[in-house]
Image: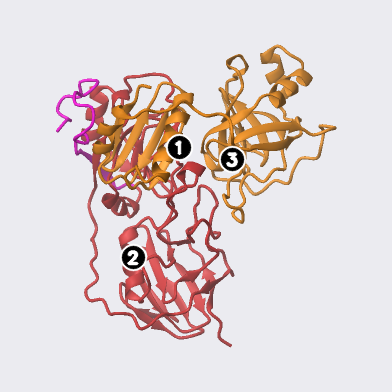
Amino acid sequence: MTDSAFVVVRPGALTTVQDLGRTGHAHLGVPRSGALDQPAHRLANRLVGNAEGAATLETTLTGCAVRLRRPATVAVTGAPCPVTVDGRPAAWGAAVRVPAGALLEAGAAAHGVRSYVAFDGGVEAEPVLGSRATDVLSGLGPAPLADGAVLRLGAPGGPAPGVDGVPHRGVAPELVLPVVLGPRDDWFTPAGLRTLTTGEFRVSAASNRIGLRTEGPSLERAKDGELASEGMALGALQVPPDGRPVLFLADHPTTGGYPVVGVVPEPYLAAAAQAVPGTPVRFTPLGRASWGPRAPRTGAGGLGQ
Amino acid sequence: MTLRSLPVGEHGLLIEVDSGEAAEALHAELLRRAAARKLPAVREIVPAARTVFLDGLADPGRLAAELPGWRIPPLDRGHSEIVEVSVRYDGPDLAEVAKRWGVTPEEAVRIHSGAEFRVAFCGFAPGFGYLTGLPERFHVPRHATPRTRVPVGSVALAGGYTGVYPRSSPGGWQLIGTTDAALWDTAREPAALFTPGTRVRFVPEPGTAGPAPGVRPEGTAP
């Protein structure tokens, strides 16, 4: 008996269905969601011949195992991890043919946090607002994988195109995140802004798909009081009252009331998504957007362009 | 209208105005311009309390430079249909809210259900709207310590806003009632009952005491 599905044998710490997310609904309070390491998600899909928007599995630290009910071409990318088919080693970062009935396991991440498992045809789930992504903040999209759950697979397309040489970013000893200051950098003192760019931060174990939390020094505020809720960007560095920046990742709330000192451009967020707790974090100033307020409003000397 | 443009990363623009009403008027103008294809391509337009955030702009500086030349008509409060939301005014904080207002709970229900609300903006969770409409003297603070769990359908007040929790989640607002209205239904278009600009009226259910609505599993919203 073959049907186009797989059974979850080991869901791991957190394995979710992800794609490119749902944009255009932030005004309804709907986060973007989607794969945190988008380049790895896209690559996994390319390796098995899927469109980049097909849904993959995103694992967290401990991988996952599934039993396939139909033969499938599978690829695992993102955080490097041992890949096995019925216990026998298979290639990471390459298309692997898995027979019907076989157990596919993506093991614990050797380094990094999130691996991506793509199947030819993609993971099928009921799209919500055009996306199959699991949003852990809102609960939209399919539930995180659970023991014994059965997930459907889409119809396989043609043969995979063949991709040579899988790029891997390697292990960075520290996470370097460029920051475009604003919109609320004026809520911090010059010393607070210096702390942002010179302070020694580390990735907190409390990080998740909503945000990468940091441990380290506290950014000194220039203003007390509350900011009225305002729209939040992917990559925003929001600073809660404890003064430690939180980098907003894909499942971040769409509005928020803590000041955003700066924004990390999207291309750097994949590295943030792969930074394990304890990784040193350094924020490097990119200055302000060229059209922004000219004079630093609180005299943040040295941080302008 | 005074518009202040603030950069948000490389592709975002936060436009700050002086009041909530001005933010709603600016949001309406942005939607008009988007519909008329007079706005550059943009991924998100997110109104909030005093701002409208535009994300995914190729050149935010160019739009920021244009803004001072815009003529933004005042908010048109007419026209759109009113969404009526049936409420049991049985919330655990109704008595305290009434006390703050200096009225009886029955009078508090009359004040709340007598006001016409408008969804100023959404956020916090899909389908959660920040509704304005209560005069300033009826504004109430949120709880110093949030409840760890607010049941789905709770009608709540904080600051100048009324909101309805679309799912069970932690929350610090003052709970005055409950509704069975479907705030969020992905089978519906739009999925949200409350979208920015929607006019809303709360209608007291006769015989206000009712069973607590079914509670969904603990949410993860803040």
Compared across the picture, whether A51 is left or right of B24 comes to left
- In the image shown, does B32 or A186 lie closer to the viewer? B32
| Residue at image point 64% right, 49% down | B217
Chain in orange, by letter, is B
Q: Residues within 10 Å of mark 3 (few under 14, many from 20)?
A: many
Q: Is residue A270 above or below residue A285?
A: below
The image quadrant of residue A223 is top left
How many angstroms separate mark 3 from mark 2 (CA)? 35 Å
In the image, which disc is placed on residue B194? 3
Q: Label 1 is found on which chain of the structure?
A: A
Q: Is residue B177 magenta?
A: no
| Residue at image point 36% right, 57% down | A113
| Residue at image point 32% right, 58% down | A112
Q: Residues within 10 Å of mark 1 (few under 14, many from 20)?
A: many
In the image, which disc is placed on residue A42? 2
In the image, which disc is placed on residue A255? 1
Q: Is residue A284 magenta?
A: yes
| Disc 1, SS | strand
Q: Colour of chain A?
A: red
Q: Which mark lies nearer to you, 3 or 2? A: 3
| Residue at image point 48% right, 79% down | A155
